Amino acid sequence: MTEINGFSCIAFSGARGATEWTYTAGSLQWLDNAISAAEKTADGKAIFVFQHPHPFGTVYGSSVWCDPQLNPVLNRHPGIVDFSGHSHFPLNDPRSIWQGSYTAVGCGAMATFELEDHGIPGQHPAGYDPAAEMCVIEADNDGSVRIRGYDLLSDTYFCDYYIDDVNDAGTYAYTYKNMKAQDTAPVFPAGAQASAAKGEDGAWVLTFTDAQAAQGFVVHDYKIRIKDAGGKKVFSDSVINDYYVIDGDPCAHVRLDADTLEAGQTYTLSVRAESAYHKYSETLELTFTA
């Protein structure tokens, strides 16, 4: 435990084990005691806790890349802000901050991203490598905390989370219920277009204008379907959006195997955008001849 400008910072490590990160009863008691000691002098200020795996059932990725041993300790201390990682899930996904009995933050990724699609983790979509995200923390004596996501690759602040008072659960904005209620269906902007073209390597490339999410939210993935002139489905997939890549590209690009489409045939492409909290856009369509 160390103190920075009057703020207690507690770093906590487990032991490598069969579940990758495990904690002894003694180490968990040490954490509980350390937070309790910090609370005696916090005087309303946030207490910052750091450990590698997510507490189970909190931030995005914590259903798999987590340790449930942490929950009984952290749940007893509402004034803490807990930082964790291991999942490599993007920091700008709004589910990477969670508030329940305390505040938890998933710190994003360095080196590579990993995501999930329909609850299946371990997905490595286009652009997942490289990655370099960090948190910049601004904290005040009144219990307020600002967490700014910074992308080192693009030299950009790319997300911003603000907590009015870490000690007052009644003001918590980042509960799952609140965030789901505030999220809205993505919208394709006026004039949105789609195209299909065959690349030099023979693969088909679908390109379409990115849908727009509400401020502070993201388009997590696109539901893509292609039917032939007779209405038969020839391709269907859920494609993770590259919202974690900060490059200013206003379009999404999806590659299909060369034999997906037959030259000279007419097809209809349908695209729907899905938000982080499972809200869907209207359908963007394109009829084209391969």
Image (cartoon, rainbow, N blue to C red):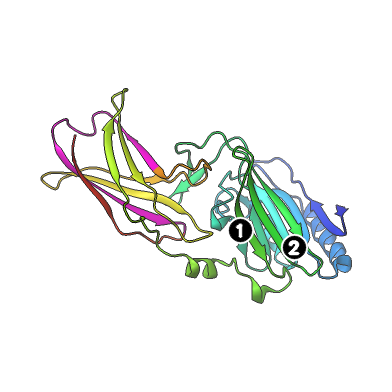
The residue sitting at the front extreme is 191
**Relative height, residue 135 to residue 104 (above, below):** above
Write down the quadrant of residue 190 in the picture.
Answer: bottom left
In the rendered structure, which segment of residues is drawn in magenta?
252-276
The percent coordinates of residue 161 (x first, y second) are 63, 60
Q: Upstream in the sequence, badge 2 or badge 1?
A: 2
Whether 171 is among the magenta residues is no
Q: Nearer the viewer, residue 156 or 139?
A: 156
The reply to whether residue 73 is visible in this rendering is: no
The amino acid on which the numbered mark 2 sits, given as a three-letter code, is Ile
The residue located at (77%, 55%) in the rendering is: 28
Prevailing secondary structure class for the magenta stretch in the rendered image = strand
Instruction: Provide residue 23's location: percent of width, then percent of height.
Output: 73, 49
253 in the magenta segment: yes
Q: Is residue 180 above or below residue 147?
A: below
In the image, which disc is placed on residue 97? 1
User: Which numbered marker is on residue 193?
Assistant: none
Relative side of 27 to 147, left or right:
right
Q: Amino acid at mark 1?
A: Ile
Disc 1, SS: strand
Quarter of the figure with the C terminus: top left
**Relative to residue 129, is residue 99 depicted above or below?**
below
- Residue at position x 15%, y 45% in the image: 232
Report how far apart the C-alphas of labels 2 and 1 lie in the structure: 13 Å
In the rendered image, which quarter is residue 257 located in? Answer: top left
Residue at the disc numbered 2? 80
Callout 2: SS: strand
